[in-house]
Image: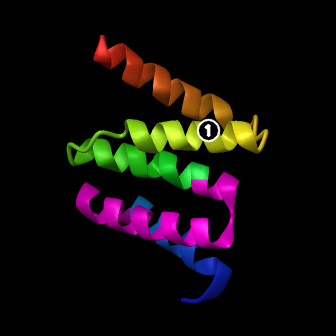
Amino acid sequence: MRGAARPYADVARGLLAPGPNESVADFEEAVLEFERLGAKVDLARCLLDLARAQQGVGVDPRPAVERAASLLRECDANLYLPEAEAALAKLDASDS
């Protein structure tokens, strides 16, 4: 798959992957493509999916969640910001 559709296909594969390792790889590919395209809101949403998958493989999801929240604030994407803020609050609660 080529062009602007590729990262969306990567996200779909990540969501349907049989395990978290495959999901992480697919979401990481999508992140790179969304960055290349400058699609900040879609990048942020993908970072949240990546963070969930990272938890499944024991990787700290905080950097992905923090970056997602920052991007959403930067874009005034208030529709999606509560999801990122809730993920950060959950991480903060588990740290204490």
Q: Secondary structure at mark 1?
A: helix
Identify which residue, 39 or 22, lies in the foreground: 39
Coordinates of residue 6 in the picture (x, y in percent): 56, 79
Quadrant where the N terminus sits is bottom right
How far across and how far down the image is residue 27, in percent?
43, 62
Above or below, comparing residue 2 to residue 88 in the picture: below
Residue farthest to the bottom, as pictured: 2
Taking depth in this image into account, of 74 and 83 the one nearest to the observer is 74
Classify residue 36 by image quadrant: bottom right
Measuring 64% from the left and 85% from the top, which residue is drawn there?
3
Q: Residue at x 68, y 52 (%)?
A: 41
Q: Which residue is mark 1?
A: 70
Segment colored magenta: 16-43
In which quadrant of the rendered view does residue 7 lie?
bottom right
Amino acid residing under circle 1: Ser
63 falls in the magenta region = no
Considering every residue shown, the one lying at the far right of the view is 76
Apparent side of residue 75 relative to residue 43 in the rendered image (left or right): right
Q: Position of residue 11 (x, y in %)?
A: 50, 65
